[in-house]
Amino acid sequence: MPDKTPINIAIIPARGGSKRIPGKNIKPFLGKPLILYSVEAALKSGAFDKIVVSTDDRQIADIAREHGAEVPFIRPSSLADDFATTADVIEHAIIQCEKLYSSKIPRACCIYPTAPFIRHTDIADGLETLVGTNAGSVFTVTTFPYPIFRALKLDTTDCLSMFWPKYERTRSNDLQEAYHDAGQFYWINTGEFLKHKQIFGHNARPIVLPRILVQDIDTPEDWEAAEILYQLCKRKGIL
């Protein structure tokens, strides 16, 4: 029996439920359903043989199909509640796609549907880094705007204190730069991922983004801020 054809896939996890912003994944963001920014960047990157949307929602599925993505399965309800993790959804999608496409999937990229600042060039760079460094995963990060070693906390009496008092007198320039997940995409070596079921696993590599391209969209206030920031980035030629 011949070996299965290897393919790279994008997995866009887009469930229907969203409590803080109802219908968030397909709500118009500056006139276009939010998920389409991710679909279009994936298409333009040229990095994928298949762009798969994992959803439990028929309306999301229809919109995705109309704009070039595939929805080869409907995600089960057990993976569409508030307790299902991204890793759970990725694992399910990889296993389903290998069966449905009769293919081996050596590399996959989870792309969040709520990432309008995503750039196709960053996706392509992520694949190049994954292959070129034999990384377990590659994902977008950005720097914290303030040294985390100077972080403060409130005690039980509402008094402030430092998490790390030893750094109180250390110059900012002498503190190590810290990064956080930018929440756009995650390239993974599927063999290693399926073995350990970890996105931030062994030999993870970064695609470092400027902070202006990173904006969580979890609340209506976040949404408004993202639209303002997106328009500014377009005028500046950053997007």
Image (cartoon, rainbow, N blue to C red):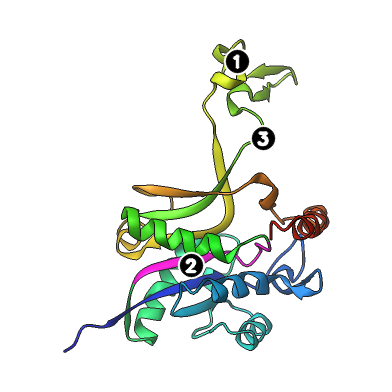
Type of amino acid at the residue the image marks with label 2:
Val
Q: Residue at x 56, y 42 (%)?
A: 180
> Quarter holding the C terminus?
bottom right
What residue would you read off at disc 2? 89
Q: Is residue 126 visible?
A: yes
Question: Which structural element holds mark 1?
Answer: loop
Type of amino acid at the residue the image marks with label 3:
Pro
Answer yes or no: do the residues labelled 1 and 2 have beta carbons within 8 Å? no
Residue 225 is situated, as x and y percent measured from the top left of the image, at 81, 53
Question: Which structural element holds mark 2?
Answer: helix
> Quarter holding the N terminus?
bottom left
186 over 166 or under it: above or below: below
What residue would you read off at disc 1? 171
Left or right for 207, reference 220: left
Residue 113 is situated, as x and y percent measured from the top left of the image, at 62, 67
Range of residues picked out in magenta: 106-116
How far is disc 1 from disc 2 in space, using C-alphas? 43 Å
Residue 92 is situated, as x and y percent measured from the top left of the image, at 43, 72
Residue 226 is situated, as x and y percent measured from the top left of the image, at 77, 56
Q: Residue at x 56, y 74 (%)?
A: 44
Left or right for 101, reference 148: left
Disc with the residue nearer the chain's start (1 vs 2): 2
